Image (cartoon, helix red, strand yellow):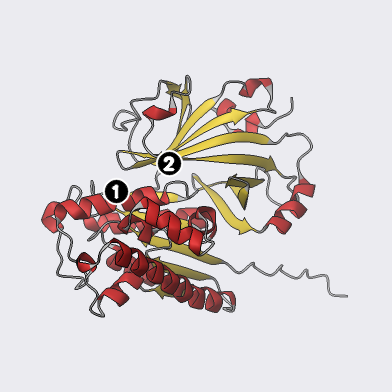
C-alpha cells in the first residue's frame, strides 16, 4: 500500500478588475504593465478594451449629441460593453489556469456621462440594478485619478484619439466616475501625489494585495488598513455622497489549516439584494498578513453557514461608504443583536500609506482615537460570545 497522500487540487481563480478614472489617468499603461506582471507569474490575462473608444473612433462626436441621443448612445454602449465582457468572462471560466480579466472601464462608467434621471430610465428599461452592475460583476475597482487633478502638466489628448475633454471637463468627469463606484466593497483610488511610475505600481500592488499574491519587495510596501474610533454618527446631511449597506459577518470553524488562520463569511447588500464573500486570513509571513477572498453565490454561502464557529456570534453592521478628498472610507455602525462591547460602537476604516499626522480625516466626524493595532477593536474579538 502506498502511504503517500495526494496533494489536493489547487482551486483555479478567475479575478475581474476594472481600471477606471477620469481622462488621461494612466489606464492604458497600467493595463499593459499589469498584464505583463500577471503573465510573468503564470496567469492567463484577458484584456477587455474600452467600449467607448471603440465606438467613438467610428465617427461619433459625443459633444454633438442632444440629451436623448446621448442617453441612447450610453444605453447601446453599455449593452455592447456587457456583451464584450461576457465573451472574456466565458473564456476565462473555461481556462485551465488562473485568470485575470482587466477591464478598461466598467458597467457603471456610462452613468458619469448622462443625467441621473436618464440613467435611472435606462436602468429601469433594461431591468438592470446597481447591485448587479456595481457590486456583483467585478472583484475590484481601481480608479486612476485624471492627470487633470493635480498633475496638469501631464494632461494630454494625444495618446487617445477619442479624447476631447479639456481640463475642467476632465476634472468633472473624474469626480462623477468616482461617485459612480462608491459602494463597491473593494474600491481603490490611486491619486497623483506620487510619480506616474509609482502610481502604476501602486495600482498593481493593490490588485495583488486583494488577490492574496505575495510579491515580497517587488513593489513598494503595501498600504495598511487604518482604523479609528468615532464618537457618534453625525447627521447624514454632513456626509458627501454615500452608499449604505446592511452587512453580516460570520466566523467559521477552521480545520486542517495552520494555527492562527481565520475564515469568515460576509453578506452585504442594499434593498434586499445581496452579494456574498468568503475570506481566509492567514498568519503573518515575513511580517505580512495575507487575506484571500472569493465571491460566493447564495447557495454556497448558505451551505458554508453550517460551519459557523459556535463560540462566536454574527456581527451586524450598517456600512457607509464614501469618498473624502480622494480617500475611500468605510464607516461601520454596529447593530443589534450584538454583545454589550459593541453597543454604540462606530469605527472608521481606510487603506493608506500615510502616517496619522499626514492623513486628513473627514472633518465632519469626531474621532476619539486611532485603534488600528488595538486587538479589542478587531472584528475577530468583537464577535466573541463571552
Q: Where's the C terminus, which quadrant?
A: top right
Q: Is residue 234 left or right of residue 332?
A: left
Residue 121 location in percent, x, y? 44, 57
Is residue 308 in sight in this rendering? Answer: yes
Q: Is residue 199 left or right of residue 247?
A: left
Residue drawn at (24%, 67%), measured in percent from left and top? 65
Residue drawn at (39%, 29%), measured in percent from left and top? 237
Of tags 2 and 1, which is closer to the observer?
Answer: 1
Residue 119 location in percent, x, y? 40, 56
Is residue 279 in sight in this rendering? Answer: no
Q: For the residue carrying disc 1, how many other residues have a C-alpha within 10 Å: few (<14), some (14-19), or many (20+)? A: some
Residue drawn at (44%, 54%), measured in percent from left and top? 120
Where, by quadrant of the figure, is residue 14 drawn? bottom right
Residue 370 location in percent, x, y? 44, 25
SS of the residue at dot 1? Answer: helix
Where is 91 relative to 296, above or below?
below
Which numbered disc, 2 or 1, marks the residue that appears first in the sequence? 1
The residues bearing labels 2 and 1 have C-alpha atoms spaced at a distance of: 25 Å
The disc at residue 224 is 2
Q: Nearer the viewer, residue 250 or 110?
A: 110
Residue placed furthest toward the left: 153
Q: Where's the N terminus, which quadrant?
A: bottom right
Q: Nearer the viewer, residue 218 or 360?
A: 360
Q: For the residue carrying disc 2, how many other residues have a C-alpha within 10 Å: few (<14), some (14-19), or many (20+)? A: few
Tell me the residue that label 1 is attached to.
Answer: 175
Residue 365 location in percent, x, y? 40, 24
Where is 198 relative to 159, above or below?
above
Amino acid at each position: 500500500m502506498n502511504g503517500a497522500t495526494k496533494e489536493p487540487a489547487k482551486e483555479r481563480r478567475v479575478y475581474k478588475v476594472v481600471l477606471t478614472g477620469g481622462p488621461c489617468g494612466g489606464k492604458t499603461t497600467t493595463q499593459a504593465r499589469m498584464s505583463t506582471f500577471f503573465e510573468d507569474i503564470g496567469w492567463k490575462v484577458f484584456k477587455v478594451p474600452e467600449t467607448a473608444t471603440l465606438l467613438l473612433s467610428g465617427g461619433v462626436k459625443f459633444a454633438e449629441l442632444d440629451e436623448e441621443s446621448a442617453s441612447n448612445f450610453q444605453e447601446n454602449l453599455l449593452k455592447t460593453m456587457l456583451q464584450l465582457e461576457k465573451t472574456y468572462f466565458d473564456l476565462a471560466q473555461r481556462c485551465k489556469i488562473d485568470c485575470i480579466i482587466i477591464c478598461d472601464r466598467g458597467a457603471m462608467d456610462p452613468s458619469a456621462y448622462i443625467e441621473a434621471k436618464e440613467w435611472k430610465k435606462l436602468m429601469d428599461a433594461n431591468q438592470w440594478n446597481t447591485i448587479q452592475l456595481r457590486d456583483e460583476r467585478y472583484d475590484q475597482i481601481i480608479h486612476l485619478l485624471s492627470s487633470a487633478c493635480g498633475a496638469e502638466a501631464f494632461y494630454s489628448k494625444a495618446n487617445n484619439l477619442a479624447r476631447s475633454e479639456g481640463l475642467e471637463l476632465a476634472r468633472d468627469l473624474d469626480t462623477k466616475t468616482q461617485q459612480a463606484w462608491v459602494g463597491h466593497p473593494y474600491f481603490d483610488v490611486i491619486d497623483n501625489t506620487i510619480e506616474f511610475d509609482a502610481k502604476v505600481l501602486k495600482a498593481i500592488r493593490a490588485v495583488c494585495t486583494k488577490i492574496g499574491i505575495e510579491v515580497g519587495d517587488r513593489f513598494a510596501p503595501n498600504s495598511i488598513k487604518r482604523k479609528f474610533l468615532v464618537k457618534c454618527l453625525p447627521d447624514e446631511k454632513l456626509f458627501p455622497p454615500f452608499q449604505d449597506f446592511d452587512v453580516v459577518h460570520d466566523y467559521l470553524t477552521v480545520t486542517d489549516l495552520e494555527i492562527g488562520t481565520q475564515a469568515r463569511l460576509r453578506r452585504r447588500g442594499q434593498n434586499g439584494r445581496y452579494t456574498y464573500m468568503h475570506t481566509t486570513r492567514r498568519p503573518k509571513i515575513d511580517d505580512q498578513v495575507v487575506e484571500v477572498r472569493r465571491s460566493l453565490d447564495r447557495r454556497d454561502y448558505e451551505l458554508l453557514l453550517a460551519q459557523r464557529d459556535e463560540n462566536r456570534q454574527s456581527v451586524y453592521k450598517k456600512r457607509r461608504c464614501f469618498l473624502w478628498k480622494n480617500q475611500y472610507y468605510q464607516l461601520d455602525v454596529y447593530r443589534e443583536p450584538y454583545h454589550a462591547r459593541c453597543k454604540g460602537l462606530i469605527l472608521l476604516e481606510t487603506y493608506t500609506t500615510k502616517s496619522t499626522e499626514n492623513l486628513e480625516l473627514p472633518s465632519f466626524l469626531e474621532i476619539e482615537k486611532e485603534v488600528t493595532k488595538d486587538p479589542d477593536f478587531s472584528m475577530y474579538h468583537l464577535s466573541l460570545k463571552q
